[in-house]
Amino acid sequence: MFVLGLIVAGTLSDYKEAERVPAELTAALTNIHDDAAAFKQAFPDLDLERLEDNLVGIVGAFQHDLGDDRSTQALDAINELNVSFLEFDRIGVPATYTSRLRAEQGALRRSVLRVYHVQRTEFLPSAYLLIQSIVAIIITVLAFMEIEPTYEAVIILGFISFFFISLLWLLRIMDRPFHVEERTDDDVSLFLLRSFVDRLNGSAT
């Protein structure tokens, strides 16, 4: 139980941090878009459509990376914002405004890197293996113990097995909080990012 509590404490902090990431990503994306849309009114030559496509591409690349541990497409999509920022400088957008957008770009990059770290690393793998071994030993020992009457043995074995297996499943979910399809209610939801994409697609039409 001590080792189990240690892992829960470590993974819970990562899980709580992961829950904030979609909101931080959406806020940074929205700030970049809304500022660029305001610049469009003062600088008609600004290619806002390309920027919007880039922002939508960042969300799509991020979702793709969640399903592929070796992919870093989201970082590449974030770096492509530099093309729009260079255009801002070329058409005369004040450098202070461009610097603010680059700060939002940095916030996007930090959030994505944080997700990569949480998704692709396991907190104390040796301790998790130890817990799996202990659970397997406990269930095996109980299965071969002679407990009378038989129905009590079945109830005890079923309850303990359910308890420990559920804890292991919970730890696995907490250790990998993001899934593209959000397969369980415990997965971190990406509805804010989807709402942002729907907003851009709606404004484009």
Image: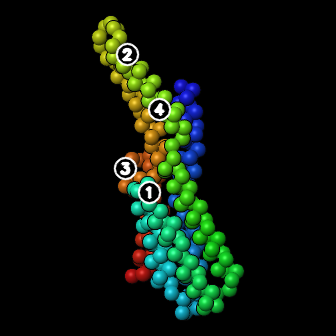
Looking at the picture, which amino acid does disc 2 mark?
Leu
Question: Cβ–Cβ below 8 Å for labels 1 and 2?
Answer: no
Q: Is residue 148 visible?
A: yes
User: Label 3, label 4: how many angstroms apart (C-alpha)?
Assistant: 24 Å
Looking at the picture, which amino acid does disc 4 mark?
Leu
Judged left or right of residue 97, residue 196 is left
Judged left or right of residue 88, residue 53 is left
Label 3 secondary element: loop
Task: Identify residue for label 4.
Answer: 129
Question: Cβ–Cβ below 8 Å for labels 3 and 2?
Answer: no
Task: Identify residue for label 2.
Answer: 142
Q: Residue at x 38, y 28 (%)?
A: 162
User: Label 3, label 2: how many angstroms apart (C-alpha)?
Assistant: 32 Å
Q: Going from the N terminus, do you reach mark 3 or mark 1 first? A: 1
Q: Going from the N terminus, do you reach mark 3 or mark 2 first? A: 2
User: Label 1, label 4: how many angstroms apart (C-alpha)?
Assistant: 24 Å
Percent x, y for residue 139?
38, 21
Few, some or many C-alpha atoms within 10 Å of disc 1 (few <14, some 14-19, many ≥20)?
Answer: few
User: Label 1, label 2: how many angstroms apart (C-alpha)?
Assistant: 41 Å
Label 4 secondary element: helix
Few, some or many C-alpha atoms within 10 Å of disc 2 (few <14, some 14-19, many ≥20)?
Answer: some
- Residue 191: image tag: none
Query: From the viewer's perspective, is the residue at label 3 or at label 1 nearer?
Result: 1
Few, some or many C-alpha atoms within 10 Å of disc 4 (few <14, some 14-19, many ≥20)?
Answer: few
Query: From the viewer's perspective, is the residue at label 1 or at label 2 nearer?
Result: 1
Task: Identify residue for label 3.
Answer: 183
Looking at the picture, which amino acid does disc 1 mark?
Arg
Q: Going from the N terminus, do you reach mark 3 or mark 4 first? A: 4
202 over 19 or under it: above or below: below
